[in-house]
Image: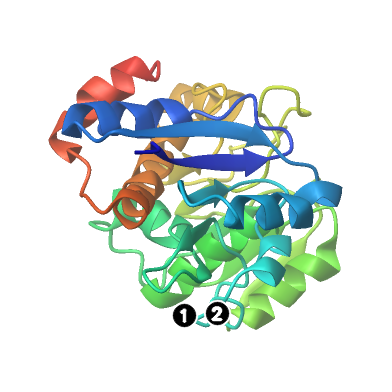
Amino acid sequence: MTQIYAEVIGDPIGHSKSPLIHGFWLKALGIDGDYRATHVTPEGLGDYFTARRADPAWRGCNITIPHKQAALDHVEDRGSVRDTIGAINLALVAEDGALIGTNTDAGGFYAPIADLDLAGAPVAVIGAGGAARAVLFALSRIGVGPVTVFNRNVLKAAALLSTFGLKGQALPLTAPLPAASLLVNTSALGMVGQPPLVVDLSPLPEHALVYDLVYAPLETPLLAAARVRDLDTVDGLEMLIGQAALAFELLFGAAPPRERDDELRALLGG
């Protein structure tokens, strides 16, 4: 019997920790499957999906930068993700053989902050890409206060606020932070191979939480600066593991052993 497999696609993809995460869970559960990272360029996205859909052993793929929006054109959108989050991070083969798209980023982002009372709280978000869409979708459901989105393209950021019905403002990356209770970096800034994220955290109040979705490196300059100020932090592994757990169950039909998260984080360098 051919071994089933899934993968993560992106451009670049060498930094991805998803194969380690899913591989750990596959081994822990004794599932005869594989999970790998595959480099796919924007120009090759259509050919990639065409080739994989012809492979009966393929269960689907996680999707990362820069394909989270473009991939919607290659899947069935049965959950109306295009009209809500507007980006997918998972394509999977359904029981009827169709390739469907969904998004586990929103749930993965929300899990580490589920116990916080953020209703009416001011929030700052850096970035306006696919990950930002998932974050803003989750924040809109929480009912946060004014949201300030920082992005190179201010009009794109303003459009996202409107899309999710959030009150706030869009500002360039160089603008100072507001006195936000939550700061989330959804951009690739600070990631290995990307420009650094330079931001002055002094406007944040003492109770603020700084949440960086970047996980390579795990200790980003943003989180290091937050710890200097003794602010609470959430690192990129929290969301990565959370969204991966939701995806794993959809791809392989079994819930991952989350009671072993500490062991998994140690494996991932966290």
**Residue 44 x %, y %:** 81, 48
Q: How many marks?
A: 2
Identify the residue shown where x is 30% and y is 16%: 266
Above or below, comparing residue 67 to residue 241 in the picture: below
**Quadrant of the image for the N terminus?**
top left
- Residue 34 visible (yes or no): yes
* Secondary structure under the numbered disc 1 in the rendered image: loop
Above or below, comparing residue 116 to residue 79 in the picture: above
**Quadrant of the image for the C terminus?**
top left
**Residue 83 x %, y %:** 60, 83
Q: For residue 24, which numbered disc appears in the image?
A: none
**Left or right: 81 with respect to 113?**
right
**Left or right: 33 with respect to 89?**
left
Q: Are marks 2 and 1 in contact (CB under 8 Å)?
A: yes
Instruction: Identify the residue under disc 1.
Output: 79
Which of the two labelled residues, at mark 2 and mark 1, occupies the earlier sequence position? 1
